[in-house]
Amino acid sequence: MEQLTEFWARITSIQMIDIFIAIGIIVFFRILSGTFSYMIIRVFKIRSKKAKEIKESAFFKPLKVFFIILGIYLAIVFLKVPLQINEQVMDIVTKAFKIISVIEFAVGLANSFTIKTTLGKKLRKSLNQKMEDSVFEFVLKVTRVLIYVIAIFFILAILEINLTGLVAGLGLGGVIVTLAAQDTAKNLFGGMVIFIDKPFVVGDWIEMENYEGTIEDITFRTTRIRTFENALVNIPNAMIADASVTNWSKMEKRRYKTNLCVELDTPLQKLDLLKTRIEKMLQERENIYDDSIIVKFDQITNNGMNILIYTYTNSVDYASYLKEVEDINTKIMKILNEENIALSYDTKTVYVKS
């Protein structure tokens, strides 16, 4: 209480005009922070004339925060003499101001390296089709990480931390860190393998072991898959790199295969007619590859005569493929009915010894 009383005594003893000026500095920078940010970005974006585009810039919000902090810092500097603030406190305030400035600059610079920003779009356009979108996004993520790492080194320098001693200290616990980071390193390496080999990209439908779904995102550590149950699964990249992955999105065509087992007493003439009509029906379909059609009498079983129907369709996505299969099956059943040919079923003859 005594310290607080002494502090207020010192406040009342100075000219109140100094405090009002300091408050005025803070309010001034707070009100005009948006205007200052707009003017600075406008200078560097000469071609941009739209206020909305400038305000959506990656540096606009970080600059606003910077000018607000600058106003507070200048107000404290102004009150240094009236409030008799010692050098140690001012040193802490100055370091805090520098650290916040570095952080805001790093945030603005890192936010510039995204696919939605002007810089990101220009880089994507300059690369044209030489790099896939997923690889380009990965490069942008790496760039953002490097920016933040460099910012951390700047902050350590501001705090006057001996980097040599820090590195030496890390060396003492290097074994522990290495053991703890093994899984992370494996996942990072797995992510690099995914981007180099490119077994899939964002938007592909894949299947692997216990997972099946659409790729939503590929990060440094994990790959996010949206399953057909609409659940989001994060799979470590190391697991994907070691697994067998089926990429259904890379299919150029889908196979249709079925077996018709007709009764053994079906005349061979009718069997030939059935084969001819089914083959003709398939050839008339636009979505069927004619050179892949196979309709053959391939087996004689205990139950009947088997006809193998085998072909490929260009209906790749699952919904259209099911519709194509349904149409083919419906037409086959109509042909069977028209030719009065019955399908056989499993039968067993039981002999009873009298």
Image (spheres, helix red, strand yellow):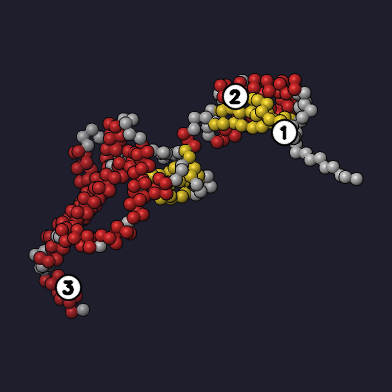
Q: Position of residue 245 (x, y in %)?
A: 46, 42
- Outermost residue on the right side: it is 354
Q: Nearer the viewer, mark 2 or mark 3?
A: 2
Q: Amino acid at mark 2?
A: Ile
Q: Residue at x 77, y 23 (%)?
A: 267
**Of marks 2 and 3, which one's residue comes earlier in the chain?**
3
Residue found 25% across the figure and 62% down from its top: 173
Instruction: Name, please, the residue furthest toward the bottom.
Output: 2
- In the figure, is residue 286 to the left or right of 297? left
Query: Can residue 72 be seen from the camera position used here?
Result: no
Q: Residue beneath label 3, please?
A: 8
Secondary structure state at the residue bearing disc 1: loop
Between marks 1 and 3 in the image, the one whose residue lies nearer the viewer: 1
Q: Position of residue 287 (x, y in %)?
A: 56, 25
Per the rendering, the mark at residue 301 is 1
User: Residue 309 placed where, x, y %?
Assistant: 64, 28
The correct choice, above or below, for 24 with respect to 306 in the image is below
